[in-house]
Amino acid sequence: MIGLAEGEPVTRPPGSSPAIEERQPAATVPVRTSPPVAPRPAGPTVTAPSPQAPVSGTSAPTATPGSAAEALRDLGRADDAALESIWDLRLPAVTIAPGQGVVTVAPEVTAGVTPAQRQVLARILGQPFTSPAVGVLAVDWNAVARAGDAAILGVGNSRYLFGLHRNRFWRLVAASPMSAALLRSAGFIVDGGAPYFFLNGQRVTLTIDHITERQSAPQLALTASNLRLSLSRENSVVLRLLHDLSPFQ
């Protein structure tokens, strides 16, 4: 292709296609360049000063976990020393003799009850009158029954009727060789009233207890199978005396 001079019009040769035409190249725009920047001479690097803690005349030592624990131990030792200076916490030396603390005699025997009496007491106390151990008492109890009393028993009169029956019974026991002998073998004094004995200087009286409480079943207040022997002070004086006699006090 033949180049055109700048400013020369474009002509289409005869017979050429109108779709094809030669375009004039775009004018070249000169590119403006910046002058080179000369490198800045190297100098010392300057950094901003960091804030510093004020400096005092005397610096305190830094606490460590080890030093804190040691300080606590020192404080505990000081407290222990102060406590020992006030109270003597040391236990005195105790010498235990051979056999010390061994009970060889029952406390009630020491109080004046013989071993034989103790065996009888264990056999007759708390047993219903109809049991074989105290059957003779049931015979005497029924022997002094008053006709008609059992039929009229109630809450209001059962205590009164029982008291009358009990007094008649103790008088008969004192006159009954078998019943009196049984109670005397247990150490009781039988003289027509309620039997009694002395335990460590204290009078202990034998009484009659209802197995089923009289207030709950007044109709059984005079029934021999609902009655048993007991000690009138077994919940107070006797137990306290036995406790006082304990070698483990």
Image (tube, rainbow, N blue to C red):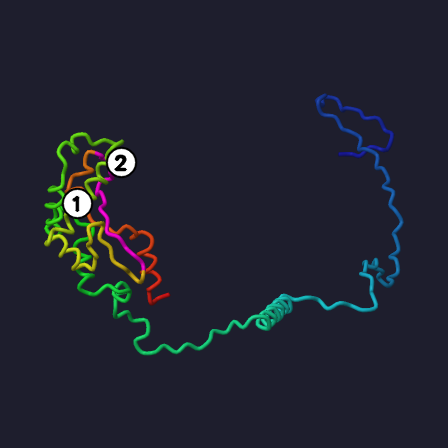
Q: Is residue 215 magenta?
A: yes
Residue 209's place in the image compared with 190, above or below, is above
Q: Residues within 10 Å of mark 1 (few under 14, many from 20)?
A: many
Q: Nearer the viewer, residue 91 or 74?
A: 91
Please state the total of marks drawn on the protein image: 2
Residue 188's place in the image compared with 80, above or below, is above
Residue 164, quarter of the rendered image: top left
Q: Residue at x 80, y 61 (%)?
A: 53
Q: Is residue 168 magenta?
A: no
Q: Position of residue 102 (x, y in %)?
A: 29, 71
Residue 215: image tag: 2
Residue 138, quarter of the rendered image: top left
Of the two numbered discs 1 and 2 on the same chain, state the one appearing first in sequence: 1
Q: Position of residue 203 (x, y in %)?
A: 29, 56
**Which dot, 1 or 2, sits closer to the camera?**
1
Q: Residue at x 46, y 76 (%)?
A: 92
Q: Position of residue 64 (x, y in %)?
A: 65, 66
Residue 23's place in the image compared with 223, above or below, is above
Which residue position holds label 1?
169
Q: Nearer the viewer, residue 46 or 114?
A: 114
Q: Residues within 10 Å of mark 2 (few under 14, many from 20)?
A: some
